[in-house]
């Protein structure tokens, strides 16, 4: 008999044959009913059906054959109309094998329902015969649905059979063991057919067949669901799990392995997995390398969370489950025959690590053990197979960990891991390239420098509790000290991060609540440890010592406060001794900075400013001798290291003058600074440009006139500075610059004329002197204007002035630079002196404007200011 050509014809034939079967059964014509059933079952022999079409056809046929016909067979046997044993023999002569096997299953299962409960031999032999006869169909799809039909047909009988004699425990156990073996054998044969399905057809349709396989996976998985509903743990452990796992591993099919492991994990109780976890993990390590083992392991962990034993062990700080997972990872590392790739190992490692972080919070030893295993795995791995840098960073910084776990304490957790876990740092240092190590520790440093807890009141500190912890933390960042790049701009961000680390560590030490760091000597020792750590690589000194020196300043101020608050003179002396010792450390740092730090000109400028600031700090703390020494060191840097750069030297002298003036204003003893002031003026006289000499010497006049320091005022010296500046201004060849310098000198004289009215300076900066200076400036400006008019014609000059007013405005800055304001774009920019030729009229107007503003200031003062009323403007 043949099958139908189309699905519509097949459905029509099934309905027609179903009607014929019902009619035959109503007339007790069983053999004719079998013939119509065979005709119906022939539709399942069609090899051209897709899995979906075959499944639809199968459902239609099974619905028709599993209701009326089995019921008639059972009733007929009980009524002794026929013997099912003979009927079972009869259907075996059906012509085609597929209909024959379906009929055998229908009759056989009906026969099982009427066999006496104590006739275990007949039942056993019949089941064995059915499972064996199904081997006759080797077509993948046909055989798969045939065995699924066997499972569906026999499941009601199995449930009834296992409960018939529950009181007889031994017999019941024996039955269950046999049924598990029966179902397992059916499952194994179904899996073979299921795997074979993907190999039928051309290789170009491989993906299509894989998709078809996944559509049929529920047929095979149903076997496992049925088994899970029948057995308890003893039989599961004794008869099922070993056979199942061995077959799954041996089939070596990634689709089957992944699906069946997931089904077993989901359908059997979590307690079963808890007790057989070692077997599951061992089997998982032997699966095909294409299997997503991390997904399987994650599902297993989720199931274990539902286990009462796990909940109990977690509450009692029992480490049993973690140890079993750790042992599993060790097995993966040691098993050289394992199919596990490094990529799979990393994925499994991440899942176990996250599981540990969630359920064993605060147990750094567990995390350390996992990192030890990972380190061992990497050591056994070829260089070419090592994980990517990004992957290792994600592991070592816990970026793939549960966010709810680490979102508030990631920084403190990482710090604790650094100072307590030996394997963690070894794992970082085991990275094959120095650039990888630096990349990882920089990411960790970014986390340490970031406060991820908005409720944290101590945002800028780490919980450093001992010197040993500090040493371990600094050791982690050794790669950043030694790492060099050819491009300095790429290297500077790393140095900036290290500078922030120094401040973070120092703040943590100074604010530490640890008993070890409460004594000031311990805090000093910790900062000295930072100094020693930075000095390991000399190229770091110039970039990191500024941060270190600023923290020495903090210690100095802290000691000063403690000394003031100490009623006991001995304690005060101890703190004063510490202050002097700390200033010596700063001096040593500055010497190292200059001598062995390979400083650039910018670095030398930084060292100079640090020395000045230290001198100022010493002066504020009434440590005048120390302050004098640091000023002297500043002059040495200025004279020996900055003399070759005119711009740096000029800026440095400005800083020196301002610092000295501020020091005097704080009431320090002026006698110790007269030498420094004279030395400052000498350095001003050595500047390359006369205008720079003029301006710096003019500023030095403030060192002889500080209103806040009455003991250090000398009008004669002020006048000498002004006169020297005026002489230098007159000697400048550029008329514009010369006039501007004189205007600046006039401005300064007006200041002294007003501020010095109640001091002896009035004997030197007199009305006559200021008036003469006003007259001189006015004459020079007139000469400059006349000179400009002689060079250019009157009309041309007027036109240029008109154009200049329309296009630009030139002003003079406080340091003598000419600024051009473009009125069309409203943008100000500095005009270099070499560009004077194009802006002569604007610069002339700007110079005159400076003089006019001074005169306006004098004229607009209150008439009661009698001093200014005496000036002629």
Image (spheres, rainbow, N blue to C red):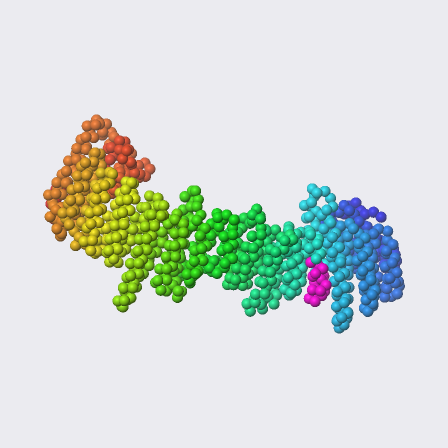
Q: Position of residue 331 (x, y in %)?
A: 61, 58
Q: Position of residue 636 (x, y in %)?
A: 27, 47
In the picture, the quarter occupied by the C terminus is top left
Q: Quadrant of residue 27?
A: bottom right
Q: Residue visible at 30% across and 38% down?
A: 830
- Is 198 displayed left or right of 75 in the figure? left
Does residue 113 belong to the magenta stretch?
no
Which of 493/40 is in front? 493
Q: Residue visible at 32% across and 39% down?
A: 827
Q: Quadrant of residue 24?
A: bottom right
Which of 158/200 is in front? 200
- Is 50 displayed left or right of 444 in the figure? right
Is residue 174 in view? yes
- Is 236 displayed left or right of 719 in the figure? right
Q: Residue visible at 74% across and 57% down?
A: 187
Task: Please identify the dominant SS of the magenta region.
Answer: helix
Number of marks: 0
Q: Position of residue 402 (x, y in %)?
A: 53, 57
Bounds of the magenta segment? 226-245
Q: Residue visible at 77% across and 69% down?
A: 171
In the picture shown, does residue 441 fall above or below 744?
A: below
Does residue 228 belong to the magenta stretch?
yes
Q: Position of residue 829 (x, y in %)?
A: 31, 38
Is residue 565 in view? no
Which of 184/828 is in front? 184
Q: Quadrant of residue 692?
A: top left
In the picture shown, does residue 261 fall above or below 870?
A: below
- Is 677 displayed left or right of 578 in the figure? left
Outermost residue toward the bottom in this view: 167
């Amino acid at each position: 008999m043949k099958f139908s050509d189309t699905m519509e014809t097949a459905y029509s034939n099934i309905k027609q044959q179903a009607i014929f079967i019902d009619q035959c059964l109503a007339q007790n014509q069983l053999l004719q009913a079998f013939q119509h059933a065979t005709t119906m079952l022939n539709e399942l022999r069609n090899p051209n059906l897709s899995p979906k079409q075959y499944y639809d056809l199968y459902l239609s046929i099974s619905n028709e054959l599993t209701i009326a016909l089995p019921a008639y067979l059972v009733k007929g046997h009980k009524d002794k109309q026929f013997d099912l044993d003979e009927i079972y023999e009869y259907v075996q002569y059906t012509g085609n094998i597929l209909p024959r096997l379906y009929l055998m299953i229908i009759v056989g299962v009906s026969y099982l329902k009427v066999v006496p409960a104590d006739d275990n031999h007949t039942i056993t032999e019949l089941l064995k015969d059915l499972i064996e006869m199904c081997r006759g169909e080797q077509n993948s799809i046909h055989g798969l649905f045939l065995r699924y039909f066997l499972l569906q047909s026999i499941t009601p009988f199995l449930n009834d059979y296992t409960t018939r004699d529950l009181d007889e425990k031994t017999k019941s156990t024996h039955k269950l063991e046999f049924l598990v073996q029966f179902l397992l054998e059916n499952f194994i044969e179904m899996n073979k057919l299921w795997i074979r399905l993907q190999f039928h057809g051309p290789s170009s349709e491989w993906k299509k067949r894989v998709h078809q396989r996944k559509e049929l996976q529920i047929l095979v998985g149903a076997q496992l669901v049925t088994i899970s509903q029948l057995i308890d743990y003893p039989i599961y452990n004794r008869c099922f799990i070993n056979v199942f796992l061995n077959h799954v591993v041996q089939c070596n099919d990634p689709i089957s392995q992944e699906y069946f492991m997931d089904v077993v994990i989901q359908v059997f109780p979590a307690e079963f997995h808890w007790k057989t976890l070692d077997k599951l993990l061992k089997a998982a390590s032997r699966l095909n390398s294409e299997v997503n083992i991390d997904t399987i392991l994650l599902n297993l962990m989720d199931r274990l969370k539902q286990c009462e034993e796990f909940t109990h062990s977690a509450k009692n700080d029992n480490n049993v489950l973690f140890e079993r997972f750790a042992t599993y990872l060790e097995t993966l590392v040691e098993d050289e025959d394992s199919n596990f790739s490094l990529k799979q190992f990393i994925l499994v490692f991440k899942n176990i690590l996250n599981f540990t972080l969630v359920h064993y919070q605060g147990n750094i030893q567990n995390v350390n053990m996992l990192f030890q295993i990972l380190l061992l795995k990497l050591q056994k791995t070829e260089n070419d197979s090592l994980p990517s840098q990004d992957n290792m960073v994600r592991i070592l910084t816990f970026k793939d960990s549960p966010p709810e776990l680490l979102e508030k304490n990631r920084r403190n957790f990482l710090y604790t891991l650094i100072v307590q876990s030996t394997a963690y740092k070894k794992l970082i240092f085991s990275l094959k390239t120095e650039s990888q190590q630096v990349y990882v520790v920089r990411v960790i440093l970014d986390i340490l420098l970031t406060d991820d807890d908005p409720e944290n009141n101590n945002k800028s500190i780490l919980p450093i509790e001992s010197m040993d912890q500090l040493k371990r933390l600094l050791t982690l960042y050794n790669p950043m000290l030694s790492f060099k790049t050819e491009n300095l701009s790429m290297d500077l961000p790393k140095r900036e991060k290290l500078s922030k680390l120094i401040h973070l560590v120092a703040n943590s030490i100074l604010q530490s609540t640890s008993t070890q760091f409460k004594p000031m000597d311990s805090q000093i020792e910790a900062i000295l440890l930072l100094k020693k750590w930075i000095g390991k690589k000399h190229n770091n000194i110039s970039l990191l010592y500024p941060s270190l020196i600023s923290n020495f300043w903090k210690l100095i101020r802290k000691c000063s406060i403690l000394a003031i608050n100490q009623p006991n003179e001995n304690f005060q002396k101890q703190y004063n001794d510490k202050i002097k010792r700390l200033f010596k450390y700063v001096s040593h740092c500055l010497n190292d900075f200059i001598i062995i730090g390979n400083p650039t000109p910018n670095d030398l400028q930084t060292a100079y400013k640090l020395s000045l600031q230290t001198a100022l700090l010493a002066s504020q703390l009434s440590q005048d001798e120390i302050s004098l020494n640091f000023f002297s060191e500043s002059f040495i840097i200025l004279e020996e290291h900055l003399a070759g750069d005119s711009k740096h030297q000029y800026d440095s002298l400005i800083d020196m003058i301002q610092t000295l003036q501020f020091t005097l204003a704080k009431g320090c003893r002026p006698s110790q600074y007269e030498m420094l002031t004279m030395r400052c003026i000498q350095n001003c006289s050595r500047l390359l440009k006369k205008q720079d000499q003029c301006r710096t010497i003019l500023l030095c006049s403030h060192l002889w006139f500080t209103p806040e320091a009455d003991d250090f005022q000398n009008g004669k010296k002020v006048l000498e500075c002004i006169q020297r500046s005026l002489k230098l201004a007159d000697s400048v060849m550029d008329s514009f610059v010369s006039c501007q310098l004189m205007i600046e000198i006039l401005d300064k004289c007006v200041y002294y004329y007003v501020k010095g009215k109640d001091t002896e300076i009035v004997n030197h900066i007199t009305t006559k002197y200021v008036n003469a200076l006003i007259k001189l400036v006015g004459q020079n400006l007139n000469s400059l204007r006349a000179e400009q008019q002689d060079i250019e014609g009157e009309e041309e000059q007027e036109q240029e002035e008109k154009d200049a007013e329309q296009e630009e405005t030139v002003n003079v800055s406080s340091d003598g630079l000419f600024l051009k304001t473009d009125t069309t774009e409203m943008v100000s920019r500095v005009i270099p002196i070499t560009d004077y030729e194009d802006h002569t009229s604007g610069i002339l107007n700007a110079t005159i404007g400076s003089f006019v503003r001074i005169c306006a200031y004098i004229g607009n003062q209150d008439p009661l200011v009698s001093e200014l009323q005496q000036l002629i403007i």
